[in-house]
């Protein structure tokens, strides 16, 4: 399934809606986001899930996040843990691509892997990697889990502030 942002507040993948399959058909799902461009400066691409039969995107998750980068002038490099970009049993939307500016050439691309979302026995693990261009090139790694044994059948993406001005998110099931 492919969703395209055009000044969009959210992009949501809901099992059984608009030909979205996010159920026990596959044990692994991959979301690929391409050229996500924010409408506001210094925004992060974020995501959250919803349990089958639940309401609201507010599942409890534990995550970790680190990143590496370099500015365009080559005068500043870093490898850092994303203090404040992780969650310990939190219910907020999780950052997966951070520090994206709204300049015409700034955007983020990457992928989010979701493992066994239909399990009603185990928690649901996920991991993401993104490449972003803001005032620098940055490479972010995030992983964690939804701390629920309920099936997850909805995933929503949004920016930490403002809309997604442009970009595409694709969902693939892996056999």
Image (spheres, grey):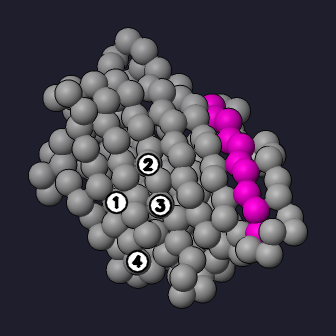
Q: Please report the bounds of the magenta region as a residue range.
A: 60-71
Residue ranking furthest to the top: 121
Find the distance from the CA under tag 4 to the CA under tag 3: 12 Å
The residue pinned by badge 2 equals 111
**Residue 119: percent from left, percent from top:** 32, 19
Q: Is residue 62 magenta?
A: yes
Find the distance from the CA under tag 3 to the CA under tag 1: 9 Å
Which residue occupies 60% across, 41% down?
142
- Examine the residues drawn in magenta and state their main secondary structure: strand
In the image: residue 84, left or right of residue 64: right
Mark 1–mark 2 contact, CB under 8 Å? no
The residue mark sitting in front, 4 or 2, is: 2
Q: Residues within 10 Å of mark 2 (few under 14, many from 20)?
A: many
Q: Is residue 121 magenta?
A: no
The residue pinned by badge 4 equals 166
Find the distance from the CA under tag 3 to the CA under tag 2: 7 Å
Closer to the camera in the image, 112 or 162: 112
Mark 4–mark 2 contact, CB under 8 Å? no
The residue pinned by badge 1 equals 169
The residue pinned by badge 3 equals 109
Which quarter of the figure is the C terminus placed in? top left
Q: Could you tell which of marks 4 and 3 lies nearer the N-terminus?
A: 3
Which residue occupies 34% across, 24% down?
116
The residue mark sitting in front, 3 or 1, is: 3
């Amino acid at each position: 399934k492919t969703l395209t942002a055009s000044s969009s507040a959210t992009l949501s993948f809901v099992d059984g809606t608009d030909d979205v399959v996010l159920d026990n058909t596959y044990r692994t799902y991959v979301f690929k986001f391409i050229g996500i461009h924010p409408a506001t400066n210094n925004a992060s691409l974020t995501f959250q899930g919803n349990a089958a039969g639940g309401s609201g995107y507010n599942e409890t998750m534990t995550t970790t996040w680190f990143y590496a980068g370099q500015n365009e002038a080559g005068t500043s490099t870093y490898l850092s843990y994303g203090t404040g970009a992780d969650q310990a049993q939190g219910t907020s939307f999780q950052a997966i691509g951070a520090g994206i500016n709204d300049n015409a050439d700034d955007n983020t691309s990457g992928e989010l892997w979701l493992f066994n979302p239909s399990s009603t026995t185990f928690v649901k693990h996920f991991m993401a990697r993104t490449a972003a261009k803001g005032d620098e090139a940055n490479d972010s790694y995030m992983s964690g889990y939804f701390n629920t044994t309920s099936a997850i059948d909805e995933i929503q993406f949004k920016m930490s502030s403002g809309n997604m001005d442009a970009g595409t998110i694709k969902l693939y099931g892996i056999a």
